[in-house]
Amino acid sequence: MKYLLLRRITQISILTLFLVSNLYGLKILQGNLSSSMIFGTIPLSDPFAVLQLFLASFTLAGSAALGALIVVLIYALIAPRAFCAWVCPVNMITDFARFVRVKFGYDKDKKVVVFSKSFRYYILAFVLFMSVVMQTPAFEGVSFIGIIQRGIIYGGTLWIFVAFGVFAIDAFVGDRLICSKLCPLGAFYATIGKFAFIRVEHDSQNCTKCMKCKVICPESQVLGIIGKESGLITSSECISCGRCVDVCGDDALKFSIRNLRRK
Amino acid sequence: MKDRREVLKFGLKAISLVIAGGFTWSTQTNLKAQTLILRPPGARDEKGFMASCIRCGLCVEACPFDTLSLAKLGDNISFGTPYFTPRETPCYMCTDIPCTVACPTDALDVKLVSTDDKLDINKSRMGIAVLDPYSCIAFAGIQCDACYRACPLIDKALVLEYKRNERTEKHAFLLPVVDANYCTGCGKCENACVTKKAAIFVLPREIGLGEVNDNYVKGWIEDDDTRLKDIDTKIKLDQNKVKDYLNSGEI
Ligand code: SF4
Ligand code: SF4
Ligand code: SF4
Ligand code: SF4
Ligand code: SF4
């Protein structure tokens, strides 16, 4: 439960900081997840959005470029897709959808839609291509993440329906469709997180093959080595949520720092 | 008992998907033509603006007058982009232009609102004030100069033109006239207008302004004819068409 709790605290406090900074004009964390300012000095920008802006006009703009660089470095060095598990508000919705899905047994229904795992990478490529063609940041114009996070930060009502749509898709249409199959931002962070340092480490000596981790993992394909061999979960599709570490009762999983010298 | 549970389960699924689908459908069928959007000062042209705004809302948060809003879903404006509605809150033309300065992507470009590297809010071109003489009460001969007084560029962007009122034969009309060379589109006139629906209102410049052909030379303006210097004077007429024109009535 440790990491789950920590994640919820992080996700909610980031949104709260944005919200109070907006409401009371504080300079703590201004803007939103697309681009922001910490204490009015350090810029942070969504690197995927900045990449789309660059492709839309082939110019790199102002402090957003610096902000994007900072964010890329953070996520590229720390842990793969840490944004998805620790920052993105959609994660809370899809986790809840998964809970409902299992609780009411929708996961045992016949599969209606089957998407390949790599579908989100095609969407990623498509978004970048469309940004060039349409000369506008293509995903930002339809981003459910954008609608939901801005809805929380700046208020409004209609975003709730989008959030509900995300919930309904994950709960009733297909398991973890939004984050695992469709979201191009998740695909983007998986791509830049290839060399991140913090990884989940598996110790097959302790593993009792209960498979609790595989059941709970939102990207269970990354846990291929469970029960077979010791080592790091190398796939950067792991969202670094730590759920597997939380549920493993046999001390076979933990976060550890990847040793670069080994390779 | 098992069956009842199955029915409930199916019901929850069906209702949720219908609501979610219905909402998506309604947003798509409700899309009206883009409303007339006014962007913050310093905004690049609409195409360039859309290609560079990251929708962060930093401009909105920087504005001390709460002039700007970030478009929400259902506003019929590309969501997350900033705009303002002068009839509600105009732009107060801050000399330090905090909104433009805050923009991290140059979608609001400081260069567009600077003269000699110094911020100059009077250079901003958010839109153009347009007047409807049929609802402006000054055109009815009633004395009103609310918009004129409100204009931050009084006697430049908004001038009063004096004209004799032929109907009463002793009063004057004081008619507000907008000069597009100075109007910034801040909307203080629209905000101040006393009529039920503003008789003077701001439109995006591409919509509110016309354009003359180059060939109308205003001889009384110095050097206005230089435009004609390198002009192509070859007239391209189709000889046969000219011959036929008396018969067909067409050149
Ligand atoms: S996959 Fe996309 S929606 Fe899901 S948590 Fe990551 S960024 Fe958010
Ligand atoms: S491997 Fe563990 S940390 Fe990675 S996504 Fe799966 S549950 Fe989360
Ligand atoms: S110039 Fe001042 S009043 Fe006008 S939009 Fe910018 S911050 Fe707001
Ligand atoms: S500050 Fe710039 S990028 Fe951010 S919303 Fe305003 S115009 Fe767009
Ligand atoms: S305030 Fe309105 S009614 Fe009065 S002069 Fe100006 S435009 Fe006309």
Image (cartoon, coloured by chain):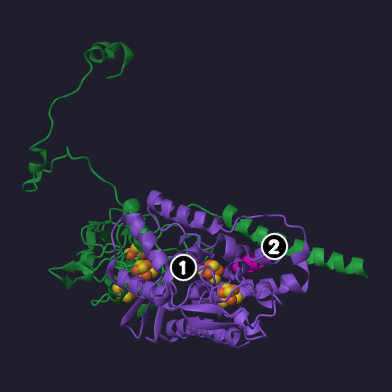
The quadrant of the picture showing ligand 1 is bottom right
Which sits in the foreground, B8 or B177? B8
Which sits in the foreground, B144 or B231? B231
In the picture, which chain is purple?
Answer: A
Dominant SS type (magenta): helix
Above or below B179: residue A219: below
Which of the labelled discs sits on residue B19, or is there none?
Answer: 2
A142 is within the stretch colored magenta:
no
Q: Is circle 2 on the same chain as circle 1?
A: no
Chain B shade: green
Identify the image quadrant of the C terminus of chain A: bottom left
The structure residue drawn at horizontal position 33% and vertical position 62%, both measured from the top left corner, is B138
* Mark 1 surroundings: few (<14), some (14-19) or many (≥20) residues within 10 A: many
Residue type at numbered disc 2 = Ile
Which of the labelled discs sits on residue A189, or is there none?
Answer: 1
Quarter of the rendering containing residue B167:
bottom left
SS for tag 1?
A: helix
Quarter of the rendering containing residue B21:
bottom right
Mark 1 near ligand 1 (CB under 8 Å)?
A: yes
Identify the image quadrant of the N terminus of chain A: bottom right
Q: Can residue A137 be seen in the rendering of this structure?
A: yes
